[in-house]
Image: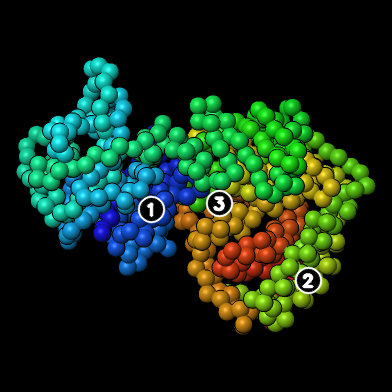
Amino acid sequence: MRLIIPSAKVVPEELQKLGKLPAIIYPINQRITFDYLYEQYKEKTNSIDIICYENADKVQRRLKNYLGEKVKIEILPELSDLGHTIYFGLKDAVGTVIINFADTIVLDSVTGIKGNAFFCQEDYMSDTWTYFDEKDGTIVRIYDKEPVKKEIKKKLFVGVFQFTDAAYFRRCLEIAFEQESLQMSTFYYALQEYSKKYSMKAVLTNNWFDIGHEDKYYNSKLEVRAREFNHITIDKNRGILKKTSDDKDKFIGEIKWYLKLPADVEYVSPRIFDYSTSYVNPYVSMEYYAYHTVHELFLYGDLTLQQWIDIFNRIRFVCDDFKRYTVQDAGIRSALEEMYLTKTLQRFKKMKKDERFITFFESPIVVNGKRYLPLNEIIISLEQAIPEMLYDVDTFNIIHGDLCFANIMVDSNFSFIKVIDPRGKFGTYDIYGDFRYELAKLFHSVDGKYDFIIKDLFDLDYNSEAACINYRIQDRKREFDLYKVFLSTFATEIDSDLKKIELIEALLFLSMIPLHGESIRHQMVMLGTGLEILNRVIDIQIGEKKNV
């Protein structure tokens, strides 16, 4: 079975705030559309053909890790209507073919339908969709985005079609191309023609998302998020998200963080409607926002320089607002020690129990051609460097504690932000902590490319026995250096603490390795990244001394 995904045009203008992106790579809840389609079809189809034209180069870059014998990108010689795009994709097709529009995700079993069929939904008519009348499997009339004069319900095409005779459907498209003054898309004319020979089953669904219209898109974000997280339920009608967690200690800390925020900084967090901090069954009900995370924008968006400056300025404003609330007491030193030294040593101890990392502790480590000290020796260096560099603050302020890009949401106009999933604890403190830690969390996204790592957007070759790692982050091509934009925006906040922040950033990467045991590939890239960043701060390189 063959799958054809027409994605020749970029999304409509109202969705271009994230850039002129084809629907197939448009972000939705920290993934892109194709991620969902691939999961649906990878086991059921022999080939997946994506037909592109506008900004095809962006599609090729984004889908690089998917491309191979099964997944192919074909580029149209010229842009025409939907029918011509699909005709091009069908050029060698025989037997059964599924056509899934690039802006459509159906959550029902799309590969479970039999014979000639398509998905549809019944709704009030509008000039946004394409509707149809059918009788005994034959489509007798099509209403293709026609003006509506009265309220009436009809069935509309969702955007997923299955044809058992691909060659004949291609012939139907040729017939459509020969028609003059068509009042509908050539694709739908061909569909109607095809149904005269092959009875088409209309399969009703209310379980689908449309990425091609702004209102439906943001509703889709809500629906998909609700399905992806087992511990989250969303009341769509009220816009309320209820969250539970198996990690009760951490989760209760998160709830208390929301509750303890001073009133004049509560704007940065969702409104809390109900909660319980009982260890038996902790939960929180809060306002839900279908905003993009900065993680999505960073990986998949195509934002302008000014848009990024606006986003960073919003984040900086919140950080500065938090700094108005401070605490000074005798517990700060022990909290710093716990977070930076004790935690790091504990994580290294855990990592040392993994036989895949034994050589890394005992032998020099090669990362991208450069040799670094074994981890055993690096630990000794850290035991000296951490107290010398990081125990020098006597004041904590309010921090989020896990200010990575995935936990920062931005409204559609990039005018304000909301933060979610706070750490809730810094040593013995709840809402207070080291501001440099806050910045380091941002650094580990924009500098260390953490977001690319967890999404497998990297090339990697490693040898555990030789303690050798070669990797390359598949970074975005931009007309500007986003890291420099970030440094410039936060120049006042960073001040003279850059090396200290980089040290914390390196510790974040090194200490998170044992927490990502589900992927040795992630762990290897995190180790390589952590060592390269650490080498900016303390000299761990062998054979080449840095100029100080």
Q: Earlier in the sequence, mark 1 or mark 3?
A: 1
Kindly identify the residue that appears in the image at 37 percent across and 45 percent down.
Answer: 108
On the image, the x and y values in percent for residue 106 come to: 36, 44
Label 2 secondary element: helix
Is residue 186 visible from the viewing direction of this image? no
Q: Earlier in the sequence, mark 1 or mark 2?
A: 1
Q: CA distance from mark 1 to mark 3?
A: 34 Å
- Are circles 1 and 3 on residues that touch, CB within 8 Å? no
Instruction: From the image, tell me which residue sits under label 1.
Output: 40
Q: Residues within 10 Å of mark 2 (few under 14, many from 20)?
A: some
Locate residue 121 relative to residue 92 in the image: left or right: right
Front label number (1 vs 3): 1
Is residue 161 visible from the viewing direction of this image? yes
Where, quadrant-wise, is the N terminus in this rendering? bottom left
Instruction: From the image, tell me which residue sits under label 3.
Output: 482
Q: Is residue 240 above or below residue 445?
A: above
Q: How is the image coloured?
A: rainbow
Q: Earlier in the sequence, mark 3 or mark 2?
A: 2
Kindly identify the residue that appears in the image at 41 percent across and 31 percent down.
Answer: 215
Q: Residues within 10 Å of mark 1 (few under 14, many from 20)?
A: some
Q: Is residue 266 above or below residue 1?
A: above
Kindly identify the residue that appears in the image at 85 percent across and 44 percent down.
Answer: 395
Q: Hey, what amino acid is under mark 1?
A: Gln
On the image, the x and y values in percent for residue 484 come to: 59, 52
Q: Residues within 10 Å of mark 3 (few under 14, many from 20)?
A: some
Judge by depth and name the residue closer to the eye, 217 or 120: 120
Instruction: From the image, tell me which residue sits under label 2.
Output: 379
On the image, the x and y values in percent for residue 336 come to: 83, 54
Where, quadrant-wise, is the C terminus in this rendering? bottom right
Q: CA distance from mark 3 to mark 2?
A: 32 Å
Label 3 secondary element: helix
